Amino acid sequence: MQLARPWDQLLHPSHHALATEFIRFGVVGTVGFVVDTAVLYAALAAGAGLYWGRVLSYVAAATGNWALNRAWTFRSAGREGAGRQWVMFLLVNLVGFAVNYSTYALLVANLPVVAAHPILGVAAGSVAGLAGNFLLSRRFVFRTP
């Protein structure tokens, strides 16, 4: 027996799978946020700086997100070569990265509280890039056969 999902009454049945994927993508994104933040703080401790540290942390988080999305969010998608799919994921998500990183950099440069606590900029950037990353990933990386 499957439990009722909160959106069962709100969405047309044809949109249930899309809503499930989006929620899973958001959960994976939350895990990515934790990875992003942990790697950023490690990079800062190693002397990478606020900007280069964020590039490193984003690549680490994006790689983890790709693996989790491949295994869980879009598990019914085609199973092309993992290396090719990972590269495509990184390329497609450059749009989301641009939004994400721009938001982060703008906040770090203009708000001393964000420069002192970069996790705030990471969170804002993650939220800003979420929808674009989901739509582009679904369309170009994790296509259903």
Image (cartoon, rainbow, N blue to C red):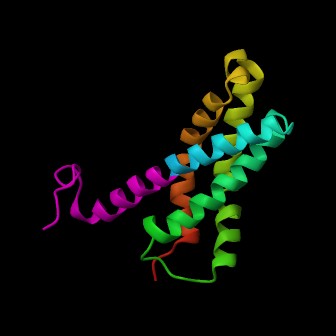
**Residue 99, placed above or below residue 21:** above
Residue 12 % position (x, y): 22, 58
The residues colored magenta run 1-28
Comparing 9 with 86, the one in front is 86
Picture quadrant where residue 102 is located:
top right
For residue 30, side relative to residue 93 (left or right)? left
Residue that extends furthest to the top in the rendered view of this protein: 112
**Residue 59, placed above or below residue 98:** below
In this orientation, does residue 138 appear? no
Picture quadrant where residue 106 is located:
top right
Q: Quadrant of the N terminus?
A: bottom left
For residue 83, side relative to residue 66 (left or right)? right
**Residue 92, placed above or below residue 118:** below
- The structure residue drawn at horizontal position 72% and vertical position 37%, both measured from the top left corner, is 41
Residue 70 % position (x, y): 52, 70
- The structure residue drawn at horizontal position 68% and vertical position 49%, both measured from the top left corner, is 97
Picture quadrant where residue 43 is located:
top right
Residue 19 lies in the magenta stretch: yes
- The structure residue drawn at horizontal position 72% and vertical position 21%, both measured from the top left corner, is 116
In this orientation, does residue 98 appear? yes
Residue 94 % position (x, y): 70, 55
Residue 19 % position (x, y): 34, 56
